Amino acid sequence: MLTKRIIPCLDIKDGRTVKGVNFEQLRDAGDPIELAAFYANQGADELVFLDITATVEKRKTLSELVNKIAHKINIPFTVGGGIQTEEDVSILLQNGADKISINTAAFQNPDIINRFAKNFGSQCVVLAIDTKLEADGNWYVYLKGGREKTNTLTMDWAKKAVDLGVGEILLTSMNHDGTKQGFALDITAALSSALAVPIIASGGGGNEAHFYDVFTTGKADAALAASIFHYKEVAIPHLKKYLNEKGIAVRI
Amino acid sequence: MKTVIIKYNAGNIQSVLYALERLGVSAMVTDSIEEINTADKVIFPGVGEASTAMQYLRERNLDELIKNLKQPVLGICLGMQLMCMHSTENNTSCLGIFEEHVKQFETKEPAIKIPQIGWNTITALKTPLFKGIAENSFAYFVHGYYAAKGKHTIATTHYIQDYSSALQKDNFYGVQFHPEKSAKAGEQIIQNFLAL
């Protein structure tokens, strides 16, 4: 049976993990490679690396890092952040990334989805959508790390992107991100029901029950979180044991 | 031991290369007929679309080469599908090593996503390729087409229906999942292949 995936997310800046991570098992918690290997050994099903490096010249650091990660870990991983061209994608895939994620660039120029899917295959094109529930009761697409609102409904953009060839959608609710009050179940379920591609839910996971909720009510195929794993508020082996006991298929 | 990875227009070849490096094996990525013929082990990877990949292989006579190899050959994902008889993906005639046919997953159930992406179990494991691998071990899959069950099936997975997650005939092995991304079980399967 296909299992639900648990995905830790690592924010990378200038080749280092950004959020303060505190694992005594690690010699250097700022080292993304060591942290990635730690999560892989803990039973993470995939990893996502989000590069928030500001400058283009530092991008070389990212491809070198991706290469080192690919040599070290034996599970799939996605790399996102600032990807705009075929060359960006090609460099990351050649260095061993399994998938790339795109966000603002895809919204501003949807044709790149089509081109990336054609050149590299839909299976490696993940569309990240930052979404926010507004007072009018609708979920809108936000760009540039949530700084810029659009007038496009999240469902409309997701449907269009799937038609253009994205292989998965990573949906982050800005209303829920950082709250630890649970994932955005309604919009996640709405997208998952309407679209043929897997939905990775992100934002708001604060305890084990939240993951159960997003896999059942939220109909998510995978769930992503960052700080609760980094700060050991939720341990992946225990989370998977909990989900398994509650009847959710997970890889143990 | 000389291990080669067949270079063609359907990668992600790099992931396979790195997985071998993690096991201390240095492999050559090549489309040279001589290099492939003289290898001890041949890996035929692949992610992509069947007809484009077959066309590329035919144009370089790699199709005849692969069919006639005598050393152990491991097809991965699309590589395995191309070793079958035929794929409904753009109605493609494949290498015909395995008699099984490749079809697209179909379901009317909206909760089931196509392609299948993620970790699923492998069962009814046969041949030394799965030596030391427990029944119901997990492997990582990414595919929208599947090989039906047939006489060459050496591992079975369930997604919508039972299908062949691995095939074997003589020196030819194929796995639908990605051993290079399937954690420790995947590494064991690669090591088993290299030990054939």
Image: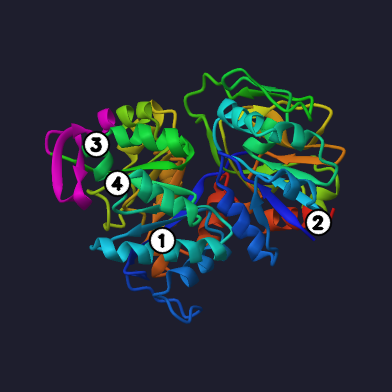
Q: Quadrant of residue A139?
A: top left
Residue at the spot of label 4: A84
State the mark number for residue A63.
1
Asked if labels 4 and 3 touch by Cβ distance under 8 angstroms, the answer is: yes
Looking at the image, is mark 1 or mark 2 nearer the viewer?
Answer: 1
Looking at the image, tell me whether mark 4 or mark 1 is earlier in sequence order: 1
Indicate whether residue A145 is drawn in magenta.
yes
Q: CA distance from mark 1 to mark 3?
A: 23 Å
Looking at the image, tell me whether mark 3 or mark 4 is earlier in sequence order: 4
Image position, residue A136 (x, y; %): 12, 33
Q: Chain of mark 2?
A: B
The three-letter code of the residue at mark 4 reads Gln
Front residue of A186/B77: it is: B77
Side of A67 relative to A190 (left or right): right
Residue at the spot of label 2: B132
Same-chain status of marks 4 and 2: no
Q: Quadrant of residue B88?
A: top right
Element at label 4: loop
Image position, residue A34 (x, y; %): 49, 72
The three-letter code of the residue at mark 3 reads Asn
Front residue of B40/A145: it is: B40
Q: Quadrant of residue B172?
A: top right
The three-letter code of the residue at mark 1 reads Ser
Same-chain status of marks 1 and 2: no
State the mark number for residue A109.
3
Mark 2 Cα shell of 10 Å, populated few (<14), some (14-19), many (≥20): few
Magenta-tinted stretch? A135-157
Q: Chain of mark 4?
A: A
Residue at 67%, 32% in the rendered image: B81
